[in-house]
Amino acid sequence: MTDPQWELLLRTIDGEPLDPPPVGLIIDSPWLPGWAGVSMLDYFADQRVWLQANLEAVRRFEQVLMLPGFWAEYGMCTEPSAFGAKCVFHENDFPSVEKTLADHAAIDRLKKPNCRTDGLLPFTIRRLQRCRPEIEAAGHRIRFATARGPLNVASFLIGHTEFLMGVKTNPEETHRLLTIVTDFLVEWIGWQMDNFDSIDGMLVLDDLIGFVGEEDFRQFALPYLKRIFQSRNVSVRFLHNDAAGLITARHLDEMGVNLFNFSFNHDMNQMRAAAGPSAVLLGNIPPRDVLANGTPEEVRHSTAAMLDSLEDRRRVIVSCGGGATLNTSTENIDALCAAVAGA
């Protein structure tokens, strides 16, 4: 993200009225390799391929806030790999993770990893270190520390169904698991910040928080997310949850979140009512059915309709309800930007 783009993001967070509002997209490995014409495996394995794909995207879409920007991740494998999870990589498919915990009793033997040495984490840091000179030569800076969220990582370690069942059947063990994972994530985010003095934001992605009810959210999500977001003093505290998000939205202020990306199934005004006035809402075009699979005219229509429905355009970044998905075309992103510019 360039300095002017970062300043625009901060102005949006401050609530400054902006006409037109900014356009932003979460871009990472599901979309970027295919758009750049490279295999997903090469994107992960070759830092030159990764760097050139990211540079090509930020140059082609200069008007778009690419979030988090130059994301050096390995899909869902990044954080679970530090716990020893088996990671399965494919030539042109998203990598997958196999669970490491046989049952809830195995949590007692789980140890917090060393984020400086374990799994894919050192490779993530080294990629950014080696590519930083070229990133900055292009006018961009590494702005965000990124991590999958505590429920997300915990569910990869023990299994999604097993984790959600454990909230009810094994609450003590589930809290122990979340504590270990959260301790690790706080250190991982801090280690990224310690390596890059340009970081002034954190992005935490956790869709599993959308699968629990109000009381379980308060017990098993809120305290851990609150600890992560308040672990470092940064200007941008960005949460992504494109599952059910109304419960999450009601707790953004308490967590300290000031930028929220959520499911397109929630109306923007409905989400504003739940989130309150202080958080920036990033959305809310359907990512697959419209931005990826729709025509440019359908993208323009959907974007215009969303903007026309807004009761207040402050603290809004026009985007899709989730990350950019596979097969999202240049033409459709251009249509999104054109619709915002003409609104």
Image: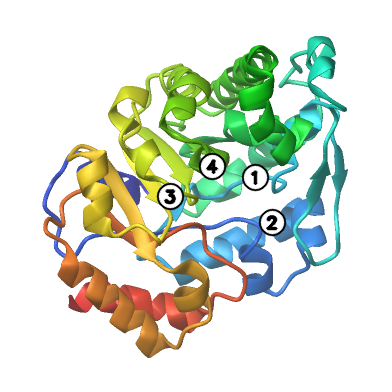
Label tally: 4
Work out how far the residue at label 2 is from the one at label 3, CA to CA, in angstroms.
16 Å
Q: Are marks 2 and 4 in contact (CB under 8 Å)?
A: no
Q: Circle 1 sits on which residue?
A: 72
Q: Earlier in the sequence, mark 4 or mark 1?
A: 1
Name the amino acid type tagged 2: Trp
The image position of residue 264, as x and y in percent, is: 40, 61
Q: Residues within 10 Å of mark 3 (few under 14, many from 20)?
A: many
Q: CA distance from mark 2 to mark 4?
A: 33 Å
Q: Give the mark nearer the N terminus: 3 vs 4.
A: 3
Residue depicted at 49% across the width and 76% down the height: 289
Which of pointers 4 and 1 indicates the residue nearer the eye?
Answer: 4
Of callouts 2 and 3, the N-terminal one? 3
**Model colouring:** rainbow
Mark 3 against mark 1, which lies toward the viewer?
A: 1
Q: Earlier in the sequence, mark 3 or mark 1?
A: 3
Q: Earlier in the sequence, mark 2 or mark 4?
A: 2
Q: Which residue is mark 3?
A: 1
* Residue 105 picture quarter: top right
Distance Cα–Cα, label 3 vs label 1: 14 Å
In depth, the one of 107 and 186 nearer the eye is 107
Element on which disc 4 rests? helix
Q: Nearer the viewer, mark 3 or mark 4?
A: 4
Q: At label 4, which amino acid type do we have?
A: Phe
Cβ–Cβ under 8 Å for marks 2 and 1: yes
Q: Which residue is mark 2?
A: 50
Circle nearer the viewer, 2 or 4: 4
- Residue 91, quarter of picture: bottom right
* Pointer 4 residue: 211
Q: Position of residue 207 (x, y in %)?
A: 54, 44
Secondary element at image label 3: loop
First reached walking from the N terminus: tag 2 or tag 1: 2
